[in-house]
Amino acid sequence: MPHGKISKTIIIGSGPAGYTAAVYAARANLEPVLFTGITPGGQLINTSEVENFPGYPNGVEGAQMMEDFRIQAERFGTRMVRTVVERVDFATGENYHCLWTDEGQEYRAYTVIIATGASARYLGLESEQRLLNKGVSACAVCDGFFFRGLEVAVVGGGDTACEEVTYLAKLCPHVHMIVRRDELRASKIMQQRLLKSTNVTIHWNSQVQEVLGENEVTGVRLINGKTGTTSDLSLQGLFVAIGHQPNTDIFKDYVDTDQRGYIITMGCTSLTGTPGIFACGDAMDHIYRQAVTAAGTGCRAALDAERYLNEHDLN
């Protein structure tokens, strides 16, 4: 891009939200430029199979689905830039915003759509990463179906963990909940829902020391935080539910975020409190975190950006 040229729309992020925003923006002749980031496709490229996204009746590999999204976005004229946005300035005092890549190149745009997503927090174990998508998952709603009839465990003690356990308890004969402390951090209502499940066992003061199995999960080794004793638990699936971290650090000086770092948008729109800046996907959604909901917010962001450009005679 020639120095000084101002794009109508720049999209940061290449998951379902970013690619969908690109499709809608390109079809509206906004000539979007999309920065893919380090991992084009976002979290879905690490998902072995997606069966709950409309239009794929036989399921699809996450990486393939994101490749389909990319091809569709490029078909309408989206320009893909395979690099990382390292720094931004959304307070230039002008009607445009500035971005810099990790290579030091500057880009300018009248509107910016933030679709940087969120990253699941993991336990940091070598065995956990080795068995990711081979029995280890960070999303019960996404992958729980594949564990129907199998014994599984969920790590965590907050609302998300309780939701995952309650969901899996309807699919699996027995669910183990591994809690680091001697109490749950979850809200009272979530605890009450959890305790209604008769096929759930809670392991208090416990942490996963190792995920067992060579090519698939066969169990976990637990260590008791109070006694220091270890024990092995046989199961076929491990769901890590210790939270997500939104990838929004570089934007915090320019847009409002909640205490966890999720970007705050206005009502059901993608508008942030900063004119010309829009947010979509898991960067602003800590509730649903599904590919289909992310795509929906990407659509909203593109439509909101188009409306903003029209209202300010920038289109």
Image (cartoon, helix red, strand yellow):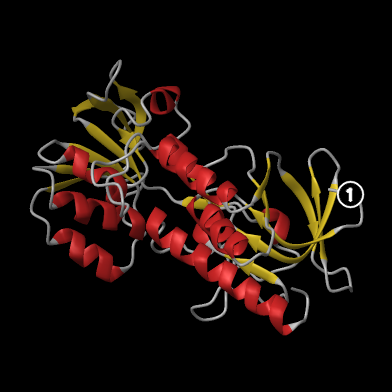
The reply to whether residue 4 is in sight is yes
Please, which residue is most extreme toward the top here? 214
Q: Nearer the viewer, residue 239 or 111?
A: 111
Please, which residue is most extreme toward the right here? 4
Judge whether 168 appears above or below 127 on screen. Answer: below
Q: Nearer the viewer, residue 202 or 63?
A: 63
Left or right, 262 with reference to 33: left
Q: Position of residue 229 (x, y in %)?
A: 29, 27
Check the picture and name the quadrant holding the C terminus: bottom right
Q: Residue at x 35, y 34 (%)?
A: 48
Where on the picture, by quarter, is residue 160? bottom left
Where on the picture, by quarter, is residue 254? bottom right
Judge whether 281 appears above or below 43 on screen. Answer: below
Which residue position holds label 1? 2
Left or right, 17 with reference to 104: left
Q: Residue at x 71, y 39 (%)?
A: 83
Q: Position of residue 8 (x, y in %)?
A: 74, 65
Q: Position of residue 314 (x, y in %)?
A: 78, 75
Q: Nearer the viewer, residue 71 or 200?
A: 71
Left or right, 14 with reference to 204: right
Disc 1 is placed on an element classified as loop
The reply to whether residue 290 is in sight is no
Q: What is the crowding at mark 1: few (fewer than 14 residues within 10 Å), some, or many (at least 20)?
A: few
Left or right, 137 with reference to 120: left
Q: Position of residue 141 (x, y in %)?
A: 28, 51
Q: Residue at x 86, y 42 (%)?
A: 104
Where on the picture, by quarter, is residue 307? bottom right
Kind of residue at disc 1 = Pro
